[in-house]
Protein backbone atom coordinates (compact mmCIF):
# COMPACT_ATOMS: atom_id res chain seq x y z
CA UNK A 1 0.00 0.00 0.00
CA UNK A 2 1.59 3.26 -1.14
CA UNK A 3 1.69 6.53 0.78
CA UNK A 4 0.95 8.61 -2.31
CA UNK A 5 -2.00 10.95 -1.99
CA UNK A 6 -4.26 11.87 -4.87
CA UNK A 7 -4.74 15.49 -5.85
CA UNK A 8 -8.33 16.39 -6.60
CA UNK A 9 -9.43 19.96 -7.33
CA UNK A 10 -13.23 20.12 -7.23
CA UNK A 11 -14.76 23.26 -8.72
CA UNK A 12 -18.48 22.60 -8.32
CA UNK A 13 -19.54 20.77 -5.18
CA UNK A 14 -22.82 19.79 -3.52
CA UNK A 15 -22.87 20.10 0.26
CA UNK A 16 -25.82 18.29 1.82
CA UNK A 17 -26.93 19.57 5.23
CA UNK A 18 -25.14 22.87 4.53
CA UNK A 19 -27.64 24.78 6.70
CA UNK A 20 -26.85 22.74 9.83
CA UNK A 21 -24.15 23.34 12.42
CA UNK A 22 -21.12 21.62 10.86
CA UNK A 23 -22.25 21.73 7.22
CA UNK A 24 -22.69 25.52 7.31
CA UNK A 25 -19.25 25.91 8.90
CA UNK A 26 -17.80 23.87 6.00
CA UNK A 27 -19.63 26.05 3.43
CA UNK A 28 -18.10 29.18 5.05
CA UNK A 29 -14.69 27.49 5.20
CA UNK A 30 -14.70 26.67 1.47
CA UNK A 31 -16.16 30.08 0.57
CA UNK A 32 -13.41 31.88 2.52
CA UNK A 33 -10.45 29.70 1.52
CA UNK A 34 -11.23 28.47 -2.02
CA UNK A 35 -12.68 31.29 -4.14
CA UNK A 36 -12.61 29.13 -7.30
CA UNK A 37 -15.17 26.65 -5.91
CA UNK A 38 -18.93 26.89 -6.50
CA UNK A 39 -21.09 25.38 -3.74
CA UNK A 40 -24.64 24.06 -4.08
CA UNK A 41 -26.18 23.57 -0.64
CA UNK A 42 -28.90 20.91 -0.53
CA UNK A 43 -30.86 21.04 2.72
CA UNK A 44 -34.38 20.07 3.79
CA UNK A 45 -34.41 22.73 6.55
CA UNK A 46 -35.58 20.37 9.30
CA UNK A 47 -35.82 21.70 12.88
CA UNK A 48 -31.96 21.62 12.84
CA UNK A 49 -31.44 23.53 9.58
CA UNK A 50 -31.38 27.33 9.47
CA UNK A 51 -30.87 29.34 6.28
CA UNK A 52 -29.58 32.22 8.44
CA UNK A 53 -26.34 30.21 8.86
CA UNK A 54 -25.33 30.84 5.22
CA UNK A 55 -27.50 33.83 4.27
CA UNK A 56 -24.61 36.30 4.23
CA UNK A 57 -22.74 34.35 1.52
CA UNK A 58 -25.61 33.28 -0.75
CA UNK A 59 -25.04 34.53 -4.31
CA UNK A 60 -22.91 33.64 -7.34
CA UNK A 61 -20.66 31.24 -5.46
CA UNK A 62 -23.11 29.73 -2.97
CA UNK A 63 -26.52 28.52 -4.17
CA UNK A 64 -29.24 27.08 -1.95
CA UNK A 65 -31.59 24.26 -3.00
CA UNK A 66 -34.41 23.41 -0.59
CA UNK A 67 -34.91 19.65 -0.84
CA UNK A 68 -34.60 16.21 0.69
CA UNK A 69 -31.67 13.85 0.09
CA UNK A 70 -34.19 10.98 -0.14
CA UNK A 71 -35.72 12.56 -3.27
CA UNK A 72 -34.16 10.57 -6.16
CA UNK A 73 -35.78 12.71 -8.87
CA UNK A 74 -34.36 15.88 -7.36
CA UNK A 75 -30.91 14.26 -7.23
CA UNK A 76 -31.25 13.31 -10.92
CA UNK A 77 -31.78 16.98 -11.73
CA UNK A 78 -29.17 18.34 -9.33
CA UNK A 79 -26.14 16.04 -9.36
CA UNK A 80 -25.10 16.06 -13.06
CA UNK A 81 -22.54 18.82 -13.70
CA UNK A 82 -21.15 18.70 -10.16
CA UNK A 83 -17.80 17.08 -9.48
CA UNK A 84 -18.24 16.13 -5.81
CA UNK A 85 -20.86 15.51 -3.13
CA UNK A 86 -19.87 16.24 0.48
CA UNK A 87 -22.53 14.60 2.60
CA UNK A 88 -23.29 16.20 6.00
CA UNK A 89 -27.11 15.97 6.11
CA UNK A 90 -28.32 13.75 8.93
CA UNK A 91 -30.54 13.41 11.92
CA UNK A 92 -27.74 14.07 14.38
CA UNK A 93 -28.98 13.97 17.99
CA UNK A 94 -28.73 10.81 20.12
CA UNK A 95 -31.56 11.77 22.53
CA UNK A 96 -33.96 12.33 19.60
CA UNK A 97 -33.02 8.94 18.16
CA UNK A 98 -34.01 7.31 21.45
CA UNK A 99 -37.35 9.15 21.58
CA UNK A 100 -38.18 8.50 17.89
CA UNK A 101 -35.75 6.46 15.75
CA UNK A 102 -37.71 6.48 12.47
CA UNK A 103 -36.44 9.74 10.90
CA UNK A 104 -32.89 8.47 11.56
CA UNK A 105 -33.51 5.41 9.42
CA UNK A 106 -35.00 7.54 6.65
CA UNK A 107 -32.41 10.31 6.45
CA UNK A 108 -29.23 8.58 7.60
CA UNK A 109 -29.68 5.22 5.85
CA UNK A 110 -32.08 5.79 2.94
CA UNK A 111 -30.73 9.29 2.30
CA UNK A 112 -27.15 7.98 2.04
CA UNK A 113 -28.34 5.19 -0.26
CA UNK A 114 -29.98 7.74 -2.61
CA UNK A 115 -26.85 9.91 -2.71
CA UNK A 116 -24.64 6.88 -3.40
CA UNK A 117 -26.92 5.85 -6.26
CA UNK A 118 -26.63 9.35 -7.72
CA UNK A 119 -22.83 9.39 -7.25
CA UNK A 120 -22.66 6.04 -9.03
CA UNK A 121 -24.99 7.03 -11.87
CA UNK A 122 -23.24 10.34 -12.62
CA UNK A 123 -19.71 9.25 -11.63
CA UNK A 124 -19.32 11.97 -9.02
CA UNK A 125 -16.74 11.88 -6.21
CA UNK A 126 -18.39 11.32 -2.81
CA UNK A 127 -17.17 12.27 0.67
CA UNK A 128 -19.08 10.81 3.61
CA UNK A 129 -19.10 12.73 6.90
CA UNK A 130 -19.48 10.33 9.80
CA UNK A 131 -18.90 10.04 13.51
CA UNK A 132 -16.59 8.33 16.01
CA UNK A 133 -19.73 6.90 17.65
CA UNK A 134 -19.75 4.06 15.09
CA UNK A 135 -16.97 2.48 17.21
CA UNK A 136 -19.06 2.34 20.40
CA UNK A 137 -17.31 3.48 23.58
CA UNK A 138 -14.13 3.02 25.62
CA UNK A 139 -13.73 2.52 29.37
CA UNK A 140 -12.55 5.56 31.36
CA UNK A 141 -9.31 3.82 32.33
CA UNK A 142 -8.58 2.31 28.89
CA UNK A 143 -5.33 3.76 27.44
CA UNK A 144 -6.63 2.95 23.92
CA UNK A 145 -8.11 5.40 21.42
CA UNK A 146 -10.22 4.68 18.33
CA UNK A 147 -8.26 4.09 15.10
CA UNK A 148 -9.36 3.30 11.55
CA UNK A 149 -9.00 -0.39 12.47
CA UNK A 150 -11.34 -0.36 15.52
CA UNK A 151 -14.33 -2.69 14.93
CA UNK A 152 -17.78 -1.13 14.55
CA UNK A 153 -19.88 -1.40 17.72
CA UNK A 154 -22.52 1.37 17.75
CA UNK A 155 -24.78 1.80 20.79
CA UNK A 156 -27.69 4.12 19.94
CA UNK A 157 -30.26 4.30 17.13
CA UNK A 158 -28.36 7.40 15.88
CA UNK A 159 -24.92 5.78 15.84
CA UNK A 160 -26.22 2.50 14.39
CA UNK A 161 -27.76 4.39 11.45
CA UNK A 162 -24.48 6.28 10.92
CA UNK A 163 -22.59 2.95 11.04
CA UNK A 164 -25.06 1.49 8.52
CA UNK A 165 -24.48 4.44 6.20
CA UNK A 166 -20.68 4.00 6.43
CA UNK A 167 -21.05 0.34 5.45
CA UNK A 168 -23.22 1.27 2.46
CA UNK A 169 -20.51 3.69 1.31
CA UNK A 170 -17.83 0.98 1.54
CA UNK A 171 -20.02 -1.49 -0.38
CA UNK A 172 -20.79 1.04 -3.13
CA UNK A 173 -17.05 1.60 -3.51
CA UNK A 174 -16.11 -2.08 -3.64
CA UNK A 175 -19.02 -3.29 -5.76
CA UNK A 176 -19.73 -0.32 -8.03
CA UNK A 177 -16.44 1.59 -7.90
CA UNK A 178 -17.92 4.78 -6.42
CA UNK A 179 -14.99 7.16 -5.74
CA UNK A 180 -15.43 7.76 -2.05
CA UNK A 181 -13.70 8.72 1.19
CA UNK A 182 -15.12 8.54 4.74
CA UNK A 183 -14.25 10.64 7.79
CA UNK A 184 -15.24 9.82 11.38
CA UNK A 185 -14.96 12.83 13.65
CA UNK A 186 -15.30 13.37 17.39
CA UNK A 187 -17.59 15.87 19.22
CA UNK A 188 -17.70 19.30 17.58
CA UNK A 189 -18.26 22.61 19.35
CA UNK A 190 -18.45 26.22 18.22
CA UNK A 191 -21.00 28.79 17.02
CA UNK A 192 -24.30 27.82 15.30
CA UNK A 193 -24.68 24.51 17.18
CA UNK A 194 -28.31 23.66 17.97
CA UNK A 195 -29.41 24.31 21.58
CA UNK A 196 -30.32 20.62 22.02
CA UNK A 197 -26.59 19.71 22.18
CA UNK A 198 -24.64 19.63 25.47
CA UNK A 199 -22.52 22.81 25.34
CA UNK A 200 -25.11 25.19 23.78
CA UNK A 201 -27.85 23.79 26.03
CA UNK A 202 -25.93 24.62 29.19
CA UNK A 203 -24.82 28.08 28.00
CA UNK A 204 -28.33 29.08 26.90
CA UNK A 205 -29.88 27.64 30.08
CA UNK A 206 -27.66 29.94 32.11
CA UNK A 207 -28.47 32.90 29.82
CA UNK A 208 -32.19 32.12 30.29
CA UNK A 209 -31.97 31.81 34.08
CA UNK A 210 -32.43 28.00 33.97
CA UNK A 211 -30.15 25.51 35.71
CA UNK A 212 -27.80 23.41 33.51
CA UNK A 213 -28.62 19.66 33.35
CA UNK A 214 -26.03 16.92 33.74
CA UNK A 215 -26.77 13.29 32.80
CA UNK A 216 -25.82 10.31 34.98
CA UNK A 217 -22.66 10.77 37.04
CA UNK A 218 -21.21 13.44 34.73
CA UNK A 219 -17.99 11.46 34.23
CA UNK A 220 -18.64 10.54 30.56
CA UNK A 221 -15.78 11.73 28.38
CA UNK A 222 -16.08 13.39 24.98
CA UNK A 223 -13.16 14.31 22.68
CA UNK A 224 -13.88 17.96 21.73
CA UNK A 225 -12.80 19.52 18.44
CA UNK A 226 -13.60 23.00 17.13
CA UNK A 227 -15.90 22.73 14.11
CA UNK A 228 -13.51 24.80 11.94
CA UNK A 229 -10.81 22.15 12.44
CA UNK A 230 -13.36 19.54 11.33
CA UNK A 231 -13.98 21.61 8.17
CA UNK A 232 -10.28 21.93 7.30
CA UNK A 233 -9.87 18.18 7.82
CA UNK A 234 -12.78 17.30 5.52
CA UNK A 235 -11.39 19.63 2.82
CA UNK A 236 -7.96 17.97 3.17
CA UNK A 237 -9.46 14.50 2.83
CA UNK A 238 -11.64 15.52 -0.14
CA UNK A 239 -8.71 16.97 -2.05
CA UNK A 240 -5.80 14.80 -0.90
CA UNK A 241 -7.30 11.60 0.54
CA UNK A 242 -6.89 8.21 -1.04
CA UNK A 243 -10.03 6.84 -2.71
CA UNK A 244 -11.70 4.08 -0.69
CA UNK A 245 -10.04 5.15 2.58
CA UNK A 246 -11.38 6.13 5.99
CA UNK A 247 -9.73 8.89 8.06
CA UNK A 248 -10.39 9.64 11.73
CA UNK A 249 -10.60 13.32 12.74
CA UNK A 250 -9.84 14.47 16.28
CA UNK A 251 -7.77 17.07 18.15
CA UNK A 252 -6.85 15.40 21.47
CA UNK A 253 -9.64 17.22 23.31
CA UNK A 254 -10.72 14.61 25.87
CA UNK A 255 -12.66 16.07 28.79
CA UNK A 256 -15.43 14.77 31.04
CA UNK A 257 -18.86 16.41 31.07
CA UNK A 258 -18.74 17.70 34.63
CA UNK A 259 -15.43 19.49 33.94
CA UNK A 260 -16.83 21.12 30.79
CA UNK A 261 -19.95 22.19 32.68
CA UNK A 262 -18.00 23.63 35.61
CA UNK A 263 -15.78 25.57 33.17
CA UNK A 264 -18.90 27.05 31.56
CA UNK A 265 -20.36 27.93 34.98
CA UNK A 266 -17.12 29.58 36.04
CA UNK A 267 -16.70 31.63 32.84
CA UNK A 268 -20.34 32.76 33.18
CA UNK A 269 -19.84 33.85 36.79
CA UNK A 270 -21.92 31.10 38.45
CA UNK A 271 -21.22 28.77 41.33
CA UNK A 272 -19.57 25.49 40.22
CA UNK A 273 -22.44 23.46 41.76
CA UNK A 274 -25.22 25.54 40.25
CA UNK A 275 -26.69 22.72 38.10
CA UNK A 276 -29.17 19.80 38.30
CA UNK A 277 -28.29 16.12 38.06
CA UNK A 278 -30.85 14.50 35.73
CA UNK A 279 -31.75 11.02 34.49
CA UNK A 280 -29.02 9.33 32.46
CA UNK A 281 -29.34 8.72 28.71
CA UNK A 282 -30.24 5.03 28.08
CA UNK A 283 -27.20 3.19 26.66
CA UNK A 284 -25.05 6.30 27.31
CA UNK A 285 -21.57 5.84 25.77
CA UNK A 286 -18.87 6.23 28.44
CA UNK A 287 -15.91 7.63 26.56
CA UNK A 288 -14.79 8.56 23.03
CA UNK A 289 -11.15 9.20 22.06
CA UNK A 290 -9.69 9.63 18.58
CA UNK A 291 -6.22 8.75 17.28
CA UNK A 292 -5.85 10.94 14.15
CA UNK A 293 -2.28 9.82 13.32
CA UNK A 294 -3.26 8.59 9.83
CA UNK A 295 -4.79 11.94 8.82
CA UNK A 296 -1.88 13.91 10.30
CA UNK A 297 0.98 11.82 8.90
CA UNK A 298 -0.48 10.80 5.54
CA UNK A 299 -2.23 14.05 4.57
CA UNK A 300 -0.39 16.58 6.75
CA UNK A 301 -3.52 17.96 8.47
CA UNK A 302 -3.22 19.72 11.84
CA UNK A 303 -5.85 21.29 14.10
CA UNK A 304 -5.40 25.00 14.83
CA UNK A 305 -7.96 25.56 17.63
CA UNK A 306 -6.09 23.52 20.22
CA UNK A 307 -6.91 25.65 23.29
CA UNK A 308 -10.29 24.20 24.35
CA UNK A 309 -10.71 26.69 27.23
CA UNK A 310 -10.28 29.65 24.87
CA UNK A 311 -12.62 28.05 22.30
CA UNK A 312 -15.23 27.54 25.00
CA UNK A 313 -14.98 31.18 26.11
CA UNK A 314 -15.45 32.36 22.50
CA UNK A 315 -18.43 30.02 22.10
CA UNK A 316 -20.01 31.40 25.29
CA UNK A 317 -19.49 34.93 23.95
CA UNK A 318 -21.12 33.97 20.62
CA UNK A 319 -24.29 32.60 22.29
CA UNK A 320 -24.40 35.63 24.57
CA UNK A 321 -24.26 37.99 21.57
CA UNK A 322 -26.55 35.98 19.27
CA UNK A 323 -29.69 35.42 21.33
CA UNK A 324 -31.88 36.10 18.25
CA UNK A 325 -30.32 33.08 16.51
CA UNK A 326 -31.03 30.50 19.24
CA UNK A 327 -34.04 31.86 21.10
CA UNK A 328 -36.71 30.61 18.62
CA UNK A 329 -35.61 26.97 19.18
CA UNK A 330 -35.06 27.12 22.94
CA UNK A 331 -38.56 26.70 24.44
CA UNK A 332 -39.52 23.71 22.25
CA UNK A 333 -36.17 22.02 22.95
CA UNK A 334 -36.53 22.37 26.72
CA UNK A 335 -40.18 21.19 26.57
CA UNK A 336 -39.01 18.01 24.80
CA UNK A 337 -36.29 17.43 27.43
CA UNK A 338 -38.76 18.00 30.26
CA UNK A 339 -41.03 15.27 28.85
CA UNK A 340 -38.04 12.89 28.84
CA UNK A 341 -37.15 13.75 32.45
CA UNK A 342 -33.94 15.44 31.33
P1 LIG B 1 -27.27 19.25 12.47
O1 LIG B 1 -28.39 18.46 13.06
O2 LIG B 1 -26.89 20.55 13.09
O3 LIG B 1 -27.59 19.57 10.93
C1 LIG B 1 -28.14 18.63 10.06
C2 LIG B 1 -28.54 19.35 8.77
O4 LIG B 1 -29.04 18.36 7.83
C3 LIG B 1 -29.67 20.37 8.96
O5 LIG B 1 -29.40 21.54 8.22
C4 LIG B 1 -30.90 19.66 8.40
O6 LIG B 1 -31.90 20.54 7.90
C5 LIG B 1 -30.29 18.80 7.30
N1 LIG B 1 -31.09 17.61 6.99
C6 LIG B 1 -31.57 16.69 7.88
N2 LIG B 1 -32.28 15.74 7.22
C7 LIG B 1 -32.21 16.05 5.90
C8 LIG B 1 -32.71 15.44 4.71
N3 LIG B 1 -33.43 14.30 4.77
N4 LIG B 1 -32.44 16.01 3.52
C9 LIG B 1 -31.71 17.16 3.46
N5 LIG B 1 -31.22 17.78 4.54
C10 LIG B 1 -31.48 17.23 5.73
O7 LIG B 1 -26.06 18.26 12.39
P2 LIG B 1 -24.48 18.50 12.67
O8 LIG B 1 -24.22 18.41 14.10
O9 LIG B 1 -24.09 19.70 11.91
O10 LIG B 1 -23.86 17.20 11.96
C11 LIG B 1 -23.59 17.19 10.56
C12 LIG B 1 -22.98 15.85 10.18
O11 LIG B 1 -21.77 15.64 10.89
C13 LIG B 1 -23.86 14.63 10.49
O12 LIG B 1 -23.73 13.72 9.43
C14 LIG B 1 -23.29 14.08 11.77
O13 LIG B 1 -23.54 12.71 11.87
C15 LIG B 1 -21.81 14.38 11.57
N6 LIG B 1 -21.02 14.53 12.79
C16 LIG B 1 -21.44 15.38 13.78
C17 LIG B 1 -20.63 15.57 14.91
C18 LIG B 1 -21.05 16.53 16.02
O14 LIG B 1 -20.33 16.65 16.99
N7 LIG B 1 -22.16 17.25 15.91
C19 LIG B 1 -19.43 14.88 15.01
C20 LIG B 1 -19.05 14.00 13.99
C21 LIG B 1 -19.85 13.85 12.89
O1 LIG C 1 -18.99 11.98 18.90
C1 LIG C 1 -19.60 12.63 17.83
C2 LIG C 1 -21.06 12.87 18.13
O2 LIG C 1 -21.11 13.92 19.09
C3 LIG C 1 -21.88 13.23 16.89
O3 LIG C 1 -21.91 12.13 16.03
C4 LIG C 1 -23.31 13.63 17.26
O4 LIG C 1 -24.00 14.08 16.11
C5 LIG C 1 -23.25 14.73 18.28
O5 LIG C 1 -24.57 15.07 18.72
C6 LIG C 1 -22.39 14.32 19.49
O6 LIG C 1 -23.04 13.26 20.23
P1 LIG C 1 -23.09 13.23 21.84
O7 LIG C 1 -24.24 12.39 22.24
O8 LIG C 1 -21.76 12.94 22.41
O9 LIG C 1 -23.39 14.81 22.11
P2 LIG C 1 -24.40 15.59 23.08
O10 LIG C 1 -24.11 17.03 22.90
O11 LIG C 1 -25.80 15.14 22.92
O12 LIG C 1 -23.90 15.14 24.53
C7 LIG C 1 -22.55 15.29 24.94
C8 LIG C 1 -22.39 14.66 26.31
O13 LIG C 1 -23.12 15.44 27.26
C9 LIG C 1 -22.98 13.26 26.42
O14 LIG C 1 -22.17 12.50 27.29
C10 LIG C 1 -24.36 13.47 27.04
C11 LIG C 1 -24.14 14.67 27.94
N1 LIG C 1 -25.30 15.58 28.15
C12 LIG C 1 -25.97 16.02 27.07
C13 LIG C 1 -27.00 16.95 27.20
C14 LIG C 1 -27.79 17.44 26.00
C15 LIG C 1 -25.60 16.04 29.44
O15 LIG C 1 -24.96 15.64 30.44
N2 LIG C 1 -26.60 16.94 29.58
C16 LIG C 1 -27.33 17.42 28.52
O16 LIG C 1 -28.24 18.25 28.72
Image (tube, rainbow, N blue to C red):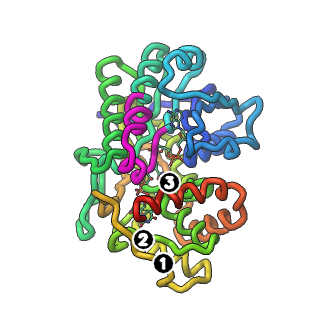
Q: Position of residue 62 (x, y in %)?
A: 70, 33
Magenta stretch: dominant secondary structure = helix
The answer to whether 277 is drawn above or below residue 77 in the figure is: below
Residue hosting label 3? 302
Q: Is residue 107 magenta?
A: yes
Work out which residue is located at the far front of the displayed protein and give it.
339
Which residue is found at the position 67% from the left and 46% from the top?
53
Q: How far apart are marks 2 and 1 (CA)?
A: 7 Å
Q: Residues within 10 Å of mark 2 (few under 14, many from 20)?
A: many
Foreground disc of the pair 1, 3:
1
Q: Where is residue 206 in the image (x, y as percent from the top left)?
A: 59, 73
Task: Check contact, mark 2 vs mark 3: CB within 8 A.
Answer: no
Residue hosting label 1? 275
| Rendered image: mark on residue 214 | 2
Q: Does the magenta stretch include residue 316?
A: no
Question: Is residue 304 at least partly visible in the picture?
Answer: no
* Rendered image quadrant of residue 333: bottom right
Q: In this view, does 250 lie to the left or right of 311?
A: left
| Label 3: element kind | loop
Q: Position of residue 120 (x, y in %)?
A: 42, 17
Q: How crowded is mark 1: few (under 14 residues within 10 Å), some or many (20 or more)?
A: some
Q: Distance between the residues labelled 2 and 3?
A: 32 Å
Which residue is found at the position 57% from the left and 73% from the top?
210
| Label 2: element kind | strand
Q: What stretch is highlighted in magenta?
A: 90-110
Quadrant position of the C terminus in the picture: bottom left
Which residue is found at the position 47% from the left and 25% from the top?
70
Q: Which of 184 and 195 is in front in this view?
A: 195
Task: Check contact, mark 2 vs mark 1: CB within 8 A.
Answer: yes
Q: Is residue 160 left or right of residue 300?
A: left
| Label 1: element kind | loop
Amino acid sequence: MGRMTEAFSPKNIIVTGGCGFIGSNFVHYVYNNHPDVHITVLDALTYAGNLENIKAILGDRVEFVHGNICDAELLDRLVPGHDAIVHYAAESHNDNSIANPEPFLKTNVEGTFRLLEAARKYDVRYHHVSTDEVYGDLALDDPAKFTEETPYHPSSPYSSTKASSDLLVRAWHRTFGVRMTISNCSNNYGPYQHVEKFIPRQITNILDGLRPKLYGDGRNVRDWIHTEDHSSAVWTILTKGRIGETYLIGANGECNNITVLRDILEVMGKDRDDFDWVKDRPGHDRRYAIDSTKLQTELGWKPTHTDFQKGLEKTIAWYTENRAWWEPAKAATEAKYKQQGQ
